[in-house]
Image (cartoon, grey):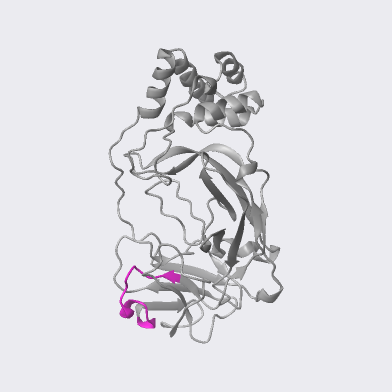
Amino acid sequence: MIRIAAVIVTFMFSHSVMACSCPWVEPAGFVHATLKRLPANARGVLFLTPQGAPSSSTNARAFSITSNEETGPLTVTVSSPDMGQERPGMATQRLLRIGPAGGFKPGARYTISYVGPAGKWAHPTTIDVAIDTQPLDMKSLQYTLAIDGAPERRLLQISDGRGSCVSRQPVVSQTFHYGLPPELQPYLNGVAYFSEVRTKAGFTAITYHATACDITPFAQTAYSGGKDLIYANCEESHAAQSIRGWVGLLEVEDRLHLTKPVVVDLSKASGKACNGMGMLKEALTNHDADKAIAIACSIQYEQPFDGVFTPYKQIKPKHPTAADLPSIEALADLKKLASNEERTCIEQVVSHLKR
């Protein structure tokens, strides 16, 4: 029992408990500044206003547009595309679409700038974009949502209130992805996504923050390329849920498209473990070396019952039991399949188990 207690204390309480502190960055500016080209029927580029911005900073006079094919500044027009509903964290912001009056000229290049006062913003105040010679037929585009394999138990990196601003939490999770039409490939950096899950109160936003200091890109998924994630505390019981997504290219169209819902059932995740040690043992038992190595290299950052689930509450963590602990022999075999860096992670786990 002394050895088990030592393992628990080392893994559960060895990290700083100081409060997390992040510098303030305003989530404002041209949100798709990495989008370098648009179809000929684009109506403008997207600009997210500062929080609580006065009307003077959101009208046409707050912007300038120049073109390589015309002299002098162009007349600016401002419109507001529809995101389907109010989005998390945007209650005091507006999404604007900035473009030249009369539309873009096919084949031309444009520089669009915000000329009002700006502080430390997450997005640039200037964007350069080239206009393709051909329009995009938006009516022919189809969008889908698809589940990626089975749900799983894992140690997920999640935003945390501790000094490091991040920890690994034991969760059950399911990844899924958006299916996009091939015509959108040249404009992927401009595609907007909003994922939702059905609850008793109706469909609500699915959000994920890898760290408390994470500056989440506007209308993007948890992972790049339209791949998203839903997760929950692995100790809770779970029922099947419907998820859906809003997706589209708001530089061209006024409204996002709503996908057909698909069903996620987190209760179908294999195994029973709800701590890093137990998950590591299950992965070893299932001869899943890749997952076992990933857990071994995450377990030192595990902080159960904090962050998103029970933030800042003084709840005693549930410790791993003797039955949760993997064998040293199994870890020795795992080392043979690991890289040098990964072996260091495994050796740390073994070292704590020997105490």
Residue 281 or 189: which is nearer the viewer? Answer: 281
The residue positioned 64% from the left and 36% from the top of the image is 270
Residue at point 33%, 76% (across, down) = 57
Is residue 134 magenta-colored? no
Rendered position, 312 above or below 249: above
Asked if residue 6 is positioned above or below residue 222 in the image, the reply reads above
Q: Nearer the viewer, residue 219 or 85?
A: 85
Foreground of the two, 333 or 169 = 169
Q: Residue at x 56, y 16 (%)?
A: 327
Which range is magenta? 47-61
Q: Residue furthest right?
A: 140
Query: Is 6 rendered above or below residue 115?
Result: above
Q: Name the quadrant containing residue 188.
A: bottom right
Q: Residue at x 61, y 77 (%)?
A: 40
**Residue 71, percent from left and from top:** 44, 83
Image quarter (top left, top right, bottom left or bottom right) of the C terminus: top left
Left or right for 31, reference 15: right
Q: Position of residue 268 (x, y in %)?
A: 65, 42
Q: Is residue 58 magenta?
A: yes
